[in-house]
Amino acid sequence: MDRRVPRVRVAVTVVGALIVLALGVACAGPLFWLFKAATSTSSETLADPFGFWPSGIHWENLTEAWTSVRFGTYLLNTLIVCAGTWFFGLLIALTGGYGIAILRPAYARVVSAAVLATLFIPGVISLVALYLTVIDLPVLNVNLLNTFWGVWLPAATNAFNVLLVSRFLQSIPPALFDAARIDGAGAVRIFWSLVLPLSRPIIGVVSLLTVIGAYKDFLWPLLVLPDPDLQPISVALPRIESSTDLGVFMAALLISVVLPVLLFLGFQRQFLRAAGSAGAIKE
């Protein structure tokens, strides 16, 4: 009724347009400035940070960042870190959630409470203990420094993902699992033939969270991978900042930012569909 009044309709339209414009500037503005700095010379960026390419666009900064900064090597390391963390993270989240929500042994509530309790412990508190464990792995007596295993295994044990998967599996009608047991399916067969196909929505959500977390993680890879040839982008770029031309360094930052954005834009439909349909299974 209020929108039928011309003044109210105009005011709402103007305010909505201003809000959308402000959000657009806040979100896209930093990315646009980074693109401008990455395609400008260092002197231009320092003299006039908000100037629009006084001497033209310098695309060569991108190619130089890829070659002179060894960005390809760091990108490959990052992909290896993300792939391993994703695989082991999904393995632990799915099997842990399956055991808590579906198998439900007598001690399932105790395990669930213990997993939940770890969420209240700040990561920095357990950092020293975790580092001492990595440099001398119990039982095996293996040093995992300068190995991707030292990054994969601690990052994969994510309590939030385990609880997220268990809550999703609890929303699946129990009659499906009862019917599978009546047909003679064991725990492994139920997990492979029933749980995994039904868990595609939550797998998409957990995959997105795990890959983004592994891509931007800085402190733990810095401690476990002191060898520069093994470091991912998040660790390598801050290390080379002081010895790299500003324009080239900004170009390397631009490439590192654009890659996850393109990944999300390419799979946003699958991610959003998975997030929206999680827990939507009905009996």
Image (spheres, grey):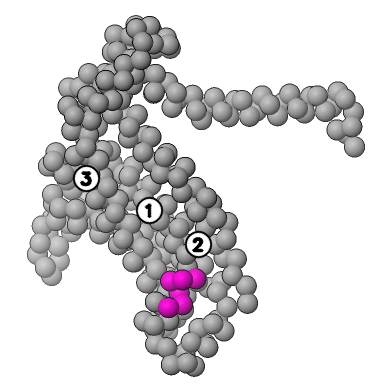
Q: Main secondary structure of the magenta part?
A: helix
**In the image, which is nearer the foreground, mark 3 or mark 1?**
3
Please name whichever residue, 103 or 83, is drawn nearer the observer in this view of the structure: 83
**What is the secondary structure assignment of the residue under circle 3?**
helix
Q: In 3D space, how far apart are the residues under numbered discs 1 and 2 (Cα atoms)?
A: 14 Å
Q: Where's residue 267, x and y in %?
A: 46, 49
Residue that badge 2 annotates: 201
Asked which quadrant contains residue 16, the reply is top right
Residue at 27% x, 20% y is 60
Residue 109 seen in render:
no
- Name the amino acid, label 3: Asn
- Name the amino acid, label 2: Pro
125 above or below 231? Answer: below
Residue that badge 3 annotates: 77
Instruction: Determine whether, in the image, residue 262 is placed left or right of residue 125.
Output: right
**In the image, which is nearer the foreground, mark 1 or mark 2?**
2
Residue at 46% x, 71% y is 197
Q: Which mark is residue 210?
A: 1
Please name whichever residue, 267 or 29, is drawn nearer the observer in this view of the structure: 267
Badge 2: how crowded within 10 Å, few (<14), some, or many (20+)? many
Q: Where's residue 30, x and y in %?
A: 45, 25
Q: Where's residue 142, x and y in %?
A: 10, 62
Residue 218 seen in render:
yes
Please name whichever residue, 67 or 118, is drawn nearer the observer in this view of the structure: 67
Badge 3: how crowded within 10 Å, few (<14), some, or many (20+)? some
Asked which quadrant contains residue 161, the reply is bottom left
Which of the marked residues, 1 or 2, is nearer the chain's N terminus?
2
Q: Where's residue 230, x and y in %?
A: 16, 44
Q: Is residue 30 magenta?
A: no
**Magenta span of residues:** 193-198
Q: Please identify the quadrant where the C terminus is shown.
A: bottom right
Which of the marked residues, 3 or 2, is nearer the chain's N terminus?
3
